[in-house]
Amino acid sequence: MGQQPQTRRAIKEQQRGRRGILPVLIGVLAVVVLGAAVWFGKGLFTSAEPTGSPSAIPGVAAPLTTTPAPSTTPSTTPSETTGATETPEVDPIVKAVASCRAKWALQSAARADAYRSLSQWDRHLKIMNDLQAGKLTLAEAKAAWPATTEKAADNIVAFRAADKALAASKDACAVAAGATGADADAIRRCAASLKAVGGVLARARVAIAPWETHLKDQSHFKAGGMTPAAAEAAWRALWQKGLATLPGYQAVAPQGQAAACTLPS
C-alpha cells in the first residue's frame, strides 16, 4: 500500500492544490483555442483564393482546367458566306444601242437650237439686204427687225449649252465591224446620221458667232454703252460677216435636218 496522509488536514491541503491547477489549465486552453480561431479567421479575409474555392480548403484538390483545342473548321466572314453578287455582262449590242441613243439625243437638241437661232439670223440679214436694195424703207426695216430678235439671245444660250453637253459626252454610236443583224445595222445607220449632223453643227458654230455678237452690241447700245455711229458701224461689219458665214451652214442644214436615227427599243 502507498503512503497515506497521516492527518485530515494534510488531505485537505492536497485536494486544494489540485483544484488550483485546473483553472490555470482551462485558461491556457482557452487562449490556445482563441488564437487558432483568429489565425484561421484572418485567412478568410486575406487569402488570394476566392472564398469557398476548393484550393483554399485543406485536403480538397482543385479541379483540372483544360484549354479548348483550336477548331480545325475554317472560319467564315459575312462576305464569304453571302458571296459577292456578280454583275451580269451586258450584251455589246445592247450597250451600243444605249450609248448611241444618248449621243443622238444630245446632238438632236443642239441641231434644233442651232436651226432655230440661225433661222432668226437669216431673216434679220434679209431685212438688211432688202433695205440696201431699196425694197424696204428704213422705217419698214426698223418695224420688221424686232420680230427676228424675239428670244434670240435665249436661243443662242440654249444652243451653247446643248453644244457643250454634246462635247462633254462620252457616249458613242459604234459597233464592232464583225457584228451582224438588224440591231447592228440600225446602229451603223445612226452613226452615219450623227456624222452628218456633226458636220452641220461645225458650220453652225461659225455662222452663229456674228449673230451672237450683234445681239450683244444692240444690248450695249440700248444701255448707252455705244454711240449710234459706233453701233451702225459694228452692225454693217457683222452684216457682211453674216453674209459670208451663214451660207455654209445653209448648204448642209437640210441634210442635217433630214437625218434620222431609229434604234431598237
Image: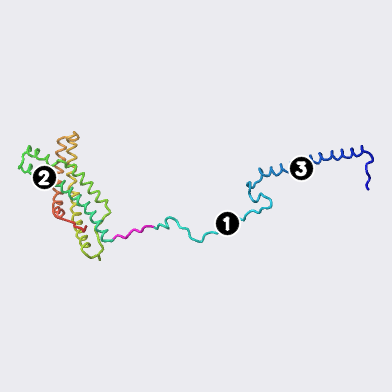
Is residue 87 found inside the magenta-colored segment of the image? yes
Outermost residue to the left: 135
- Compare marks 2 and 1 and give the one earlier in the sequence: 1
- Identify the residue under disc 3: 32
121 left or right of 49 in image: left
Query: Horizontal and vertical percent for residue 105?
Result: 21, 52
- Inter-mark Cα distance, 1 to 3: 45 Å
- Identify the residue under disc 1: 67
Determine the image quadrant of residue 66: bottom right
- Compare marks 1 and 3 and give the one earlier in the sequence: 3
Question: What is the secondary structure assignment of the residue under circle 1?
Answer: loop
Question: What is the secondary structure assignment of the residue under circle 2?
Answer: helix
What kind of residue is marked 1?
Answer: Thr
Query: Horizontal and vertical percent for residue 15?
Result: 87, 39
Question: Is the image coloured rainbow, by chain, by secondary structure, or in one colour?
Answer: rainbow
Contact between marks 3 and 2 (CB within 8 A): the answer is no
| Comparing labels 3 and 2, the label whose residue is closer to the camera | 3
The region drawn magenta spans: 84-90
Callout 1 crowding tier (Cα within 10 Å): few <14, some 14–19, many ≥20: few
- Compare marks 3 and 2 and give the one earlier in the sequence: 3
Contact between marks 2 and 1 (CB within 8 A): the answer is no
What kind of residue is marked 2?
Answer: Arg
Pick the quarter of the image with the C terminus.
bottom left
Determine the image quadrant of residue 36: top right
- Identify the residue under disc 2: 123
Magenta segment main secondary structure? loop
Determine the image quadrant of residue 178: bottom left
